[in-house]
Structure formats: C-alpha cells, structure tokens
C-alpha cells in the first residue's frame, strides 16, 4: 500500500487531506510540525510527502533539504500564491505544489500524477468487483474484459479516483476533454451513461441534481 506523510500544522486542513486520501485507498500518517516530520522521515518509509511551507520549529524549505537525499517525492502545500514561492519550492526539488485552498479533486489528481511519474503508483486498482490495469488500460470483471473507449476509460478512472465525491459536469468535461466547458452537458451525460451501462453501474454512478455525478461505493 502507498504510504503518504502529511506535514501540515493546520489540523483541519491536515484532517481534510487525510480523510480524502484514506478514502482514495492511501495509507496516511500526519505530522503537525517540522521536527515531528523529520523524526518520522528518519524512521519511516514513505512513497510521497505532502509538505506545508509555513510550519512550526522547522519550515518546509528546511525539511525539503532533509528529504532530498532520501529520494521521496514531495508536493508542496502553500497558502502563498506568490510565484516566487512556487519557483523556490520547485527549484529545491519539489515535484509539484498545491495552493491553498485547493479542491479535493485537484489534490487527488496531483498525488496520482506525482506517484505515477515516480513509478510508485499501484498498477492494479480493484473496486466494486472490477479490476483496472492502469498500465495496459484494460478493465476486467473476473475473467470477462469490459471493452471501453478511451474517453470511457478515462471517465471510469476519474470516478474511481474521486469515489463518493460529487463531480460537477464542468469538472468532468475539463478533466476528460481538456477543454473549457461551454455548458455542453450532453457530451458529458452521453459518455457517463454509456460507460456506466457497460460497467453495469447504473446504481453506482448516480446523477446529483444540479451538479453532475457521484460514484457511490462503500469503503
Ligand atoms: Ca502552515
């Protein structure tokens, strides 16, 4: 299982990140100041570190220098939207950054992408009786392969990785089609409906009134 260290002194933000990453299937450990984080990094084994910059005792930049030789990917979490901070973080070797406040869907996407770039991602995702092979991009229910088009596959992955979160049509469109949403809800609806029919998930990917869709699955 992928283990993520969350270094964030604001307890409500830390908790929000922890709950959502745990829901997405990651194992999370939290540190609330730089010294505690340094201790955990020394003794533990982590696949990814989410690192706040402004921290008590030891700040995020100092911690990053400490993490560097251990070759653990880092995503900076920063409240400062200033370009200088981002550049400094990236120059010091962070893999990516998130600017507070961020949306959960963005957090999940960045975590996923940094893990994938660092080849730490789990190849197989198992959920609701199906197995997704993220390398060959195939989907199986037991022995039976479920044929999906590229867009349907990407949609499926988006829902699986954002399970139990209501996704706006606009978010879905911009994520999957990589284009600005001009209110064309038909495209999204058609693809979602086709995909969930193929998956037999009509009762799992449900319409959310005035929002879009939610993949409902019990933990
Ligand atoms: Ca902070």
Image (cartoon, rainbow, N blue to C red):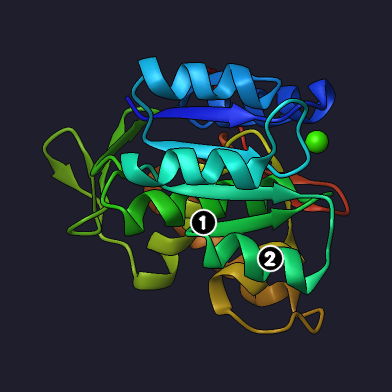
Residues at marks 2 and 1, CA–CA distance in whole angstroms: 9 Å
Q: Give coordinates of residue 126: x percent, y percent.
A: 32, 32
Residue 31: x and y in percent read 63, 20
Residue under the point 80% across and 84% down: 182
Crowding at dot 1, Cα within 10 Å, few <14 / some 14-19 / many 20+, comes out as: many
Which quadrant of the figure has residue 166? top right
Determine the secondary structure under disc 2.
Answer: helix
Residue at left offset 60%, top offset 16%: 36
156 vs 50, nearest the viewer:
50
Q: Are marks 2 and 1 in contact (CB under 8 Å)?
A: no
User: Which residue is depicted at the point 65% across and 42% down?
Assistant: 60
Q: Is residue 73 above or below residue 168?
A: above
Residue 214 at x, y percent in the picture: 67, 42
Ligand 1 occupies quarter:
top right
Hey, which residue is sitting farthest left in the picture? 143
Q: Which residue is mark 1?
A: 94
- Residue 30 seen in the figure: no
Q: Which residue is mark 2?
A: 86
> Is ligand 1 less than 8 Å from the beta carbon at label 1?
no
Task: Identify the residue at image location x=43%, y=54%.
Answer: 114
The answer to whether one can see residue 158 in this image is: yes
- Depicted 146 relative to depicted 216: above or below: below
173 or 100: which is nearer to us?
100
């Amino acid at each position: 299982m992928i283990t993520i260290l969350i270094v964030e002194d604001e307890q409500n933000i830390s908790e929000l990140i922890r709950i959502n990453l745990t829901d997405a299937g990651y194992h999370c450990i939290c540190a609330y100041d730089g010294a505690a984080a340094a201790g955990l990094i020394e003794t533990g084994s982590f696949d990814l570190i989410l690192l706040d910059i402004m921290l008590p005792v030891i700040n995020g930049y100092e911690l990053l220098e400490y993490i560097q030789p251990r070759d653990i990917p880092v995503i900076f979490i920063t409240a400062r939207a200033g370009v200088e901070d981002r550049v400094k973080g990236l120059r010091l070797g962070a893999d990516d950054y998130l600017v507070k406040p961020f949306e959960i869907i963005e957090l999940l996407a960045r975590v996923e992408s940094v893990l994938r770039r660092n080849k730490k991602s789990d190849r197989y995702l198992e959920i609701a009786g199906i197995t997704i092979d993220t390398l060959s991009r195939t989907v199986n229910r037991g022995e039976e392969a479920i044929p999906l088009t590229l867009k349907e596959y990407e949609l499926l992955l988006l829902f699986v990785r954002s399970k139990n979160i209501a996704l706006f049509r606009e978010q879905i469109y911009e994520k999957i089609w990589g284009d600005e949403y001009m209110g064309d809800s038909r495209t999204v609806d058609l693809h979602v409906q086709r995909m969930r029919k193929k998956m037999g998930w009509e009762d799992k990917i449900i319409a959310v009134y005035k929002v879009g869709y939610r993949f409902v699955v019990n933990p």
